[in-house]
Amino acid sequence: MGKYSTTFKNSLSIFIQYRINIGLILVSHIVSLSGLIFLWISVYTAGEQLADYKLGQILVYYVLVALLNAVKGDGPGMGFEIVNDINQGEITNYLLKPFSYLRYRFVSFLGAISINSAFIVPFAIIGGYIARDAIPFPDGKGWIFFALAMIFAVIFEFLTYTIASLSSFWVVKGSHFIYAAILIASLFDGSFIPLDLFPTWAYHVMSYLPFQFIIFTPIQAFLGKIENPATLFFLAVLWIIILLVILLWIWNRGIKKTEGVGR
């Protein structure tokens, strides 16, 4: 266990050294978010409304999208690193060490999220306090659901991009699968628009897919819009088990065909 705690500490040190990058990412999210806020204020001022979303709720929705993407936005970056490890043959160096490469990646991913959170959460708290009268904060149970949904979001982010990156065991341009995962996840996780604004049949299909747990479910938990939490979280656990089995199956098959020539 000590070797993984060391990995976690090392990942913290690396991301602290590149904290200016986190600052730039935060600024970029603020700029894009400002445009969305003015857009939705204009829409609602003109008398329009999105389904049963009030102005405060839709603004909070997109603020949370930006915050969640900023906090856990290292999924694609981690995927590209795995692709590079496989393509460059560096993966064999890790296989010779007495620890699990996948656990190492997960712990490093948690380290990145911890640093992102340390930089972003204080700003979120300050902003939330300033706008406390306009933000529909959840009740006690809602905060518990939100915290649980965030844990699921981190796990699904990791599983999605790790599975996509392992395509490099068979194809040269494994990065293409990362880009595909980004596009698919952004469409089906609620980053663009809330999933319940899609046609009923489409939303029904999306409600059974794992991508909703990356963005949409945590925000719904915050807004108090989760009607059957037990059923939803059971589905999340079921998908985690399925994706974990798929991940380990791909990993084991990929490792068997890996050649560490000269290493």
Image: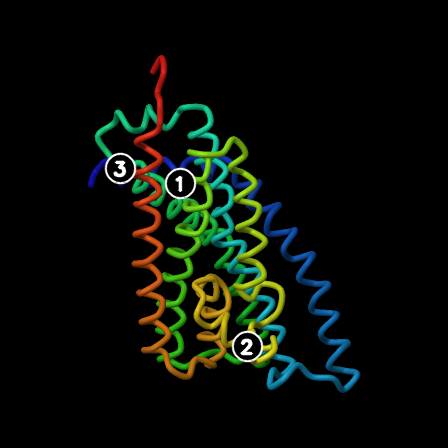
Looking at the picture, how far across and down is residue 33, in whole percent?
66, 62
Residue type marked 3: Ser
* SS at badge 2: loop
Q: Residue at x 70, y 63 (%)?
A: 34
User: In the image, which is nearer the foreground, mark 1 or mark 3?
Assistant: 3
Question: Between disc 1 and disc 2, whose residue precedes?
Answer: 1
Q: Give the labeled residue for mark 1.
A: 12
Residue found at the far top of this picture: 262
Q: Residue at x 57, y 58 (%)?
A: 186
- Tag 2: Cα neighbours inside 10 Å, few (<14), some, or many (≥20)? few
Q: Relative to 36, does residue 183 appear above or below in the rendering? A: above
Looking at the picture, how far across and down is residue 55, in whole percent?
65, 80
Q: Is residue 46 left or right of residue 82?
A: right
Q: Which mark is residue 100?
A: 3
Residue type marked 2: Arg
- Tag 1: Cα neighbours inside 10 Å, few (<14), some, or many (≥20)? many
Q: Residue at x 30, y 58 (%)?
A: 241
Q: Tell me where residue 21 sits by quadrant.
A: top right
- The quadrant of the rendering that contains the N terminus is top left
- The quadrant of the rendering that contains the C terminus is top left
Looking at the picture, how far across and down is residue 132, in whole percent?
55, 77
Q: Residue at x 49, y 34 (%)?
A: 171
Q: Give the labeled residue for mark 2.
A: 132
Nearer the observer, 23 or 76: 76
